[in-house]
Image: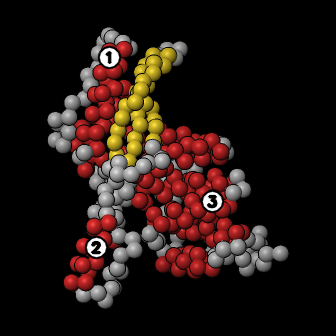
Amino acid sequence: MASPKHPGSPGWTGPIAKCTAGTKQEASAAGRDLPCPGPEGHLDAPGGPSPNSSMTTRELQEYWRKEKRGWRRVKLLFEVASARIEERKVSKFVMYQIVIIQTGSFDSNKAVLERRYSDFEMLQKSLLKTFREEIEDIVFPKKHLMGNFSEEMISERKLAFQEYLSLLYAIRCVRRSREFIDFLTRPELREAFGCLRGGQYSRALDILVRVVPLQEKLTAHCPVMVVPALCAMLVCHRDLERPAEAFAAGERALQCLQAREGHRYYAPLLDAMLRLAYALGKDFVSLQEKLQESQLRKPSPWGFTLKELTVREYLY
C-alpha cells in the first residue's frame, strides 16, 4: 500500500502545485516577434554552456560555430491542394484545403487544414494593423460580387492563397506573429480545448495529435508557446488512464519550458508529473525536489491543478 509520504497515496500531504490565476497565454504578451531560446537566440539554447561556464571566449566561439553548423531553420511549404463548396441553411461558401509540409526531409506529420475566404480576409486585416509596411507589396485576392463559386474563380483563388501564405511566411516578423500562427492553429486548438472541457478526451486527442506538430514547427523560435497544448494532451491521456502516454507528453512540455520556474504552468506540470512518475514506478524524487524549490522561490497564494489551468485556455 502506498504511504501517505508519497504522491501516489490519497493521504499524501506533500507540496501542491502553486500558480497564479492568470488566464491569458503568456506568449501573447511577448509581442509580435517573440524572442525565445533557440538557434536564433543561441546564448540561451538548450544544452549549451551555462552562464557560469569556465570556457574561454575562444572556446565559446568555437563551440557556437560548431553548433550553428548543425542548425537548420524549419522551413514550411504551403499548398492549397483542393477546395469544396459548403452549403448551409443561410450561407454558402468555399472551403480551401491547405497542406503544410516541412522541407529538407520526409515529413510524416504534414498538416492538413481548411479555411474559407473570410478567414483569410480576417488574417489580412489583422496583419495590416501591425505589419502594414512589411506586407504592402503582397497582393490579397479581391472579393467579387458574382462568380465566387465558378470553377475558374476557385482555381484562381487556390493559387492566389497559396502564393499569399508563402509570401507571408517568407517575412520573419510575420511568420512569428501571433496573428499568423493563430490563423493556422487556433480554430483546431479551440475545438480541442472545447472537447477537453466537455470531457471528450479521445476527440480532443485526435485533434491535438494533428495540430501540435504544426504548432511546434511554427513556434520553433519560442517552444514555450506549445506548452498549453502539450499539457492538454497529458490531461487527456491521464484521464483516459494512459499514464505512460501522459508522462511522455509532460516530458515534452517540461523540455519546452526549459526550467522557467516563473511560468504559470511550471509548478502544476511538475505536480502532475511527479504523481505520474510515482504511479509508473519512475524517479519522482527529483521532480518533487524541483517542485519544492520552485515553491520556495516563488510562493503563491493560489493553487491550480494542471487540469484547472488547461480548461481555461482558448475560451474565445
Res. 315 visible in picture: no
| Residue at the extreme right | 1
Write the residue at 20% across / 39% down.
135
Residues at badges 1 and 3 in contact (C-beta under 8 Å)? no
What is the x, y in percent for residue 116? 40, 27
Inspect the image, locate mark 1, and give the three-letter code of the amino acid beneath it.
Answer: Met
Q: Splitting the image into 4 quarters, where does residue 273 fall?
A: bottom right
Write the residue at 26% across / 22% down.
142
Compared to 72, does 58 lie above or below? Answer: below
Q: Which mark is residue 153?
A: 1
Of 172 and 111, nearer the camera is 111
Inspect the image, locate mark 3, and give the three-letter code of the amino acid beneath it.
Answer: Ala
Crowd band around label 2 with a 10 angstrom C-alpha radius: few (<14), some (14–19), many (20+):
few
Disc nearer the start of the sequence (1/3): 1
Disc nearer the start of the sequence (2/3): 2
Q: Splitting the image into 4 quarters, where does residue 57 fall?
A: bottom left
Q: CA gap, disc 1 to disc 3?
A: 46 Å
Disc nearer the start of the sequence (1/2): 2
What is the x, y in percent for residue 87? 50, 16
Q: Which residue is mark 3?
A: 246
Write the residue at 70% across / 69% down.
280
Tag 1 secondary structure: helix
Crowd band around label 3 with a 10 angstrom C-alpha radius: few (<14), some (14–19), many (20+):
many
Residues at badges 2 and 3 in contact (C-beta under 8 Å)? no
What is the x, y in percent for residue 169? 28, 44
Q: CA gap, disc 1 to disc 2?
A: 50 Å
Q: Which residue is mark 2?
A: 66
Q: Splitting the image into 4 quarters, where does residue 149 fall?
A: top left
Q: CA gap, disc 2 to disc 3?
A: 35 Å
